[in-house]
Amino acid sequence: MNDLQVAGVVKAYGPGAAPVLDGLDLTVPGGALTAVLGPSGCGKTTLLRVVAGFLRADEGTVTVAGRTLGGPGVHLPPERRRIGIVPQEGALFPHLSVARNIAFGLTGADRAVKRSRVSDMLDLVGLAGYGDRMPHELSGGQQQRVSLARALAPEPHLVLLDEPFSALDTGLREAVRADVRAVLRATEATAVLVTHDQQEALSTADLVAVLREGRVAQCAAPEELYRRPADPWVASFVGDAVFLPGEAERDAVRTALGTIPLDSAPAGLTLGTVLLRPEQLQVTAVDAAPAKGTVTDVRFLGHDALLAVSVDGLAEPLTVRSPGPIPARPGDRVGITVTGEATLHPAI
């Protein structure tokens, strides 16, 4: 399988500069789509460029399909790595037709093979019959699908996608994202998607790697990452988080919102920070809940609403995500109940 292995990679821009990648380790299983997510400056783009061969790592190794592409004494140039790249905004050659763009990487193949491969790629990305068009005659979403077809045409071991949907508007971005995911599934391609969009990472990828200060803070399946983040920082970065102090007792934790079942906690940890997600909190009648508070703010988002509730006994307001009609208004006294399980982390 075309696994990607990044081991102990260090990269700094210049002598004496702080490393952007600081001993980064990452494994992408063959056939999987892994999203790399993190704040600005965490090393996402640098990692992509090191894997692609545009940058040489100062330390560490990059291996794809069992072949070392970069490491001590080894640095294969990009054109010899069998890696396809889908950049931002497609970056198609404006003077070449769609078909010639897709065929660009098929060096050494005869005309019949190129025509057949281009036809297959156009069918795959849903653009059959578009081969003679020029890039400027396509929509932004169509250009991105052509860019993906161009990357997949030479049958690479790995496909790198560098924020390929960032220039598209919201509705089109979701549609193109689904198309790209379907194409990668159909070809069983191993792929790495670099993105700053948390929703995109969680909804698109098989695995999500969260980078922090040049290292992988956590790499896990989207649901695992969201439900069981490695620490409060990861929890805050991936979605909205609710933190409150708690005291563990066996398989539950006592909090200002009542006693909540525990999903996980570090061994031996008694006092710590309880993590919940806003959708686990529910607004109820004041006399029907163990916790009471006052609504201080409401933000209506269409499909749901976010309520800030100042809970009696807590210094900071909590965020409640409520689907459907807005259940309360600023100034209302409400009760708060909790559904599901909590995780406990060391105090922050």
Image (tube, grey):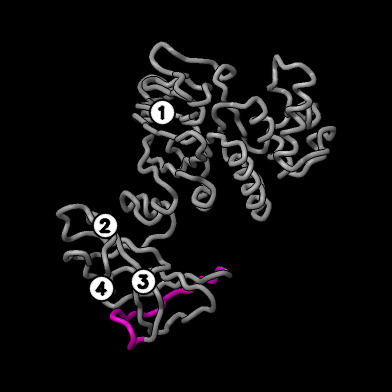
Q: Judging from the image, what secondary structure is the residue with disc 3 in?
A: loop
Q: Secondary structure at mark 2?
A: strand
Q: CA distance from mark 1 to mark 2?
A: 29 Å
Residue designated by label 2: 264
User: Residue 300: within the magenta?
Assistant: yes
Q: Position of residue 233 (x, y in %)?
A: 34, 50
Question: Identity of the amino acid at label 2?
Answer: Ser
Residue at the spot of label 4: 256
Work out whether residue 156 can be spotted.
yes
Numbered mark located on residue 152 in the image: none
Q: Secondary structure at mark 1?
A: strand
Query: Label 2, label 4: how many angstroms apart (C-alpha)?
Result: 19 Å
| 129 is within the stretch colored magenta | no
For disc 1, the marked residue is 6
- Residue 348 visible from this viewpoint: no
Is 75 displayed left or right of 280 in the figure? right
Q: At x 79% / y 21%, what residue is drawn?
A: 112
CA separation in Å, label 1 and label 4 = 44 Å
- Front of the two marks 2 and 4: 2
Q: Find residue 268 and report its image quarter.
A: bottom left
Q: Main secondary structure of the magenta part?
A: strand
Given the image, on which type of amino acid does mark 1 rest? Answer: Val
* Residues at discs 1 and 3 in contact (Cβ within 8 Å): no
What's the magenta region?
286-301
List the residue tagged with mark 3: 339
- In this rendering, is residue 175 above or below 62? below
> Does label 1 or label 3 sit earlier along the sequence?
1
